[in-house]
Image: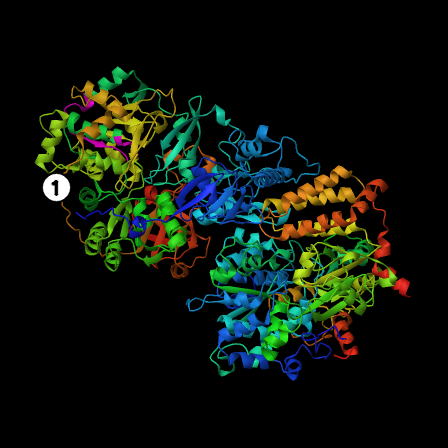
Amino acid sequence: MAYDEKTNGQMDAIIARYPRSRSAIMPMLHLIQSRDGFVTPAGIEFVSEKLGLTTAEVSAVATFYSQYKRKPVGEYHVGVCTNTLCAVMGGDAIFAGLKDHLGLGNDEVTSDGKVSVEHIECNAACDYAPVVMVNWEFFDNQTVESAKTLVDDLRSGKNPAPTRGPNKVSTFKETSELLAGFNDGHAEEGVQAGPATLLGLKKAKEMGA
Amino acid sequence: MTTIDSGRTESAVAPIEQINLIIDGFEVTVPKGTLVIRAAEQLGIQIPRFCDHPLLAPVGACRQCLVDIEINGRAFPKPQASCTIPVENGMIVKTQLTSEVAQKAQEGVMELLLVNHPLDCPVCDKGGECPLQNQAMSTGQSESRFEGTKRTFEKPVNISSQVLLDRERCILCARCTRFSEEIAGDPFISLNERGALQQVGIYEKDPFESYFSGNTVQICPVGALTGSAYRFRSRPFDLVSTPSVCEHCASGCSLRTDVRRNKTLRRLAGDDANVNEEWNCDKGRWAFQYTMAKDRIANPLIRENGQLREASWPEALAVAAAGLKGKRAGVLVGGRSTVEDAYGYAKFARIALNTNDIDFRSRPHSQEETDFLAAHVVGSKVNYQDIDSADHVVLVGFEPEEESPIIFLRIRKQVHKRALAVTAITPYLSRGFKKLNAKAVLTAPGQEAAALSGLTLTNKSIIISGERLSESAGGFSAVVQLANKSGAKIAWVPRRAGERGAIEVGAIGNLLPGGRPVSDATARVDLAAAWGVDSLPTEIGKSADQILAAANSGQLEALVIGGVDPFDMTQPSVNALENTFIVSLEMRPSVITEFADVIFPVAAVTEKSGSFMSWAGDTRSFEKAAPDAEHRSDAYVLSILSDAMETPINLTGSKAAAKEIAAVGTWDGARATFTATQANNSQEGTILATWRHLLDNGSLQANEPNLAGTARKNFARVSTKFANELGVKNGELVTISTDRGSLALPIEISEMLDGVIWLPRNGVGAESLRILGALNGDGVKVRKGI
Amino acid sequence: MNKLTPVLSAHWDDKDSFTIAGYSRHGGYSSLKKALAMEPDAVIQIVKDSGLRGRGGAGFPTGTKWGFIPQGDNREHYFVVNADESEPGTCKDTPLLMANPHVLIEGIIIGSYAIRANHAFIYIRGEVSHVVRRLLQAIDDAYKAGFLGKNILGTGFNLELTLHIGAGAYICGEETALLDSLEGFRGQPRLRPPFPAIAGLYARPTVVNNVESVASVPSIIENGAEWFSSMGTEKSKGFTLYSLSGHVKNPGQFEAPLGITLRELLDLAGGIRNGNKIKFWTPGGSSTPIFTDAHLDIPLDYESVSAAGSMLGTKALQIFDETTCILRAVLRWTEFYKHESCGKCTPCREGTWWLVQMLRDLENGIGTESDLVKLLDVCDNIGGRSFCALADGAIAPIISSLKYFRDDYLAHFKNGGCPIDPVASTLFETSKAGA
């Protein structure tokens, strides 16, 4: 499969960010996901061609990182943190509840292609546990019910705003372009910080800092 | 002639600092930079290891070689991987022999390695010579504490037609992937996935088609990588191993030939630090089935009423002797003879046939080359160590990966290690050249002389020319001129293993054995005395082309031919052979045996002792590997034929020949002088560039489909601009034609000179030399489509 | 007395704290001007004098690290920020960058100037979209303001800053794995030596610093080394972010001088939820051996935590109350390490595979005391035997849990399974109880 001129140009722009072209491989794979929805064979071949690497060298990298998908995910990829703290605080129950609610196993996609679920590792938001990520946007302090509502909304096109994030969740492909390092212009949206982030500052001010 | 200075660089003679340390209570002194694991070897202390390999960069991955170390009273808080730590003065190392911590660490790692290792040793090729099996016995525990579920994978998977991968057995030492990247420059296999699911693999669509893939099978410390050819064929303890030497190219690799019940079952790279280190190419490893081909000629054959029939040796010898005795005859040796056999042909020509009409070159050649060989190659020594210390290597008429793969590895090692400058004078920047990071001087075939004259070298540089340079008038002359100007060394690399030795023993028209010029009366007298004959023929001999032409014209009445395919030559004139009396020494039926009047069966390399002289001028001797083989060497057959002709050459076999070669010695008188040849600048039409792929339709690669499956695909290569002019895209067919024939091949656009088309010389189904009869620099016609 | 010292977090409650305008309003980028007017070595000296130690877990002195970069070597130098925050429990850099990416950028420019680097990189994990957005925007804005690019503020100093976005691999938080990943390889740790200061990114001298360490630099330049070192303890100077999570009434970020205790922090966080008792906690992420209620008064500085048998790590204080099953917690962490093991070395790759299987059996009540002996022995064969510290982290929860909660293991065997109801430990239970 050939990629269009825009993609080609973006690939070149990625390569230009680095002193050595091989460094571009990871953002390029994110960009492949933004076009194809996952890391396709065509994408691997394209990246290897573009960087003068063997396909084995590129697939070695592509299979190392868990965000690179080998098959299509949902338009909204839902990650439930089930690392210890989130799991204990309800992540396990949320993940079980979502699988049951959607009739999916881990890493499976709903038949409408809208939502996929995956259990994920610690996402650096433990003070907001249990945490659910949608296309790597934070949905904090979730419950089984709120998570079910969340995926229902995603499937029905309601597009809920993340707790700490932009006004709406971008699609998986749109997010992948962001992760390839292309600013999507939504940085100003959303809160600067959640309540847990501000707790210490609030306490300090209460104590007269 | 150019002075060949084999002096070493200063760095090699500079004193290397010595380090004193104590290992298990014993003092040892080793050069600075030595790793602890190898310092221990000096004391005979074997620390178990898997990922460690002396020719690969340390990686410290398997953790099997953990030892306790303290330096000047400061102990490392935890055991260290001895394969990654260089020695230091005042270091005290305690291995498993003296440290309980090290011993427990090693036992612990061994147990962990076995957690996921299958218990299929009884059906594993590696069983009996397996580092994991052996070290599990020496370092492991007899009972496993693992009660869980082992990791399973589909097994085995073909990662090429000749290499199979069993991921369950793999212990992820990464020797194979590191070899492929660091040594071969072919990262077609990689580590994929991560953690406990990490596994070696290829990218699905791109198999492990490296010319060096067999080395990964050899260095795999478990049975994860196995070769198709040897799989399930034998147990190591049933094999009889004989050190041997590769008969394919001029690199001169040491090999080990493993034979069971007279059958060669496998060949491995031998260990020779000065030549192939511990590597070889896949052709050397796997192309040996021809020695056991079903169509091997068993008995002498004679032609009677146009038909060949078997004959007794005495009858065949009588017929051959009658056909040769007193006749005007020539000798074509072929490029694959051992030094001893080539000597047999050389002596036979002079004594039995009274002629210097002998040539080993069963390939395109020129008078310029003949002169060059006599003046600058015979007796010369430029070797691998010179590459190690060179400041610049120039490659002309020579693509090392295709034409002498171990030279390629050696140059690449230096490129990798110290950014050795490499210049390639070539019309096509091949993958091999790219892996050498070679600066390409894109040059049309025929224009090499001009390209060479533009280079600036020093007396530490080496100009490596291939036999193909003979197809470019003035090429060798320009090499000599450049060497004279700069002091650079000259190396000449033929493709076939027997060529360099053949020059040294006089299997060429202008040289007698030991480099004695035919034209030098003193040299002739010297040799005649050694041979105990009154005189030797004085007239300079014809070249192979001239011999065939003379046979065609009737000037020669008979030919003695060993291992030659006339289609490999410039002007094949097979018709000529019908009217000439031909004695053929062969292993298997060939084009020549179709015309031959008498055919004598001869031994394959595994069936005799002998030697090959490498490109570097080193004699590489080997012993007979198949003990019960009955075939005799060419030298022996020629000797009994000479007896039948009553002009005996008295060579009872390879050993006798070797002894006599040593006794005859080399000529210390004046060398032949070299007269420069003018370059030819007139070229018309699309210019052909062509060389052989390592793996192709060569007769010694017969009957090994697994190897053949990894050959390079055959493409006609052109530049982007030329492709546009032709109106073709990658993969589309073009037809290349000459007045002799035409050939259709798919296009692959490559980095090359406009107006030039590159073709494989002898690809399977793409035998361009045979079909087109065209050489480098010849004009060909190219059109789109079939 | 106010135990908190908001510096990094001082203006996070401004709605526009993440913008260049918001940052500048409180003196943002003024330290940069000050630093660029100094000799680079003087900048390194201030950071050395401040006593700032790496906030990524290891606690190596930042200024010393900068000082290792060879000068006058005519080679490129690189400044790399480790923003791959992935250690379980760790959640400080992510909110910091969301609320104020510019303080990091300012620190990067100062650090790059000090070590004479002209190209800097931020390696951020790929699972935090909004932080990526904020950083991309902040970098764009810093370029536009002339803080990045050619001839910064007319000083002749040039600096390119590239945001490199990861793709999901905990191991890339290990600095040499990070560098391999940044070079476009699998993120597997490198052999050391050579250390990054000599041969780091592209085999050039390279500094790799944690986000919080670099973000602390502008305030040090602004207020001086003495100001910084007046906070904290003798060997653990300055302020830092403590992240409280789990079964506390009010989890969150607390910026305080090093040496504060968990008891003090718990007070600020409203104590354990529902008035429950604390059972165990991690001082600095899951790779640091757990503590119990016996450790509440240990000063949370590098030395004191270490002396008590754990590590300060990332100051990720994960609090678990009595409703939590220790085996469940440990098993889950072990599964994490198995998932994140890079696969390079035997003890980690095979060891984590085996440990998970053993712990699953134990959690299911299948086991005897002799299995605990085996478990500890296998841990002993993994710890200190692997290529990098990941495996040491993997066995830390197992060994420390057996030290403090051996009876819990035995209770599982007796009970034929986990005796603890998982529902009781959830947040929903807290909310119900609170409601």
Residue at (56% x, 80% y) in the render: C144
How many numbered dots are placed on residues in this image?
1
Q: Chain of mark 1?
A: B
Location of residue C381 by image quarter: top right
Q: Amino acid at mark 1?
A: Ala
Location of residue A197 by image quarter: bottom right
Q: Circle 1 sits on which residue?
A: B670
- Residue B7 location in percent, x, y? 25, 47
Residue B754 belongs to the span the image colors magenta: no
Establish if A87 lies above or below B659.
below
Q: Write down the region rendered in magenta.
A: B322-339
Residue B323 belongs to the span the image colors magenta: yes
| Residue A36 in the figure: left or right of residue C418 | left
Establish if B237 lies above or below C21.
above
Establish if B579 lies above or below C240.
above
Looking at the image, which is closer to me, C101 or A116? C101
Looking at the image, which is closer to me, B631 or B168? B168
Looking at the image, which is closer to me, C154 or A160? C154
**Local SS, label 1:** loop
Looking at the image, which is closer to me, B189 or B283? B189
Location of residue B437 by image quarter: bottom left
| Residue C179 in the figure: left or right of residue C23 | left
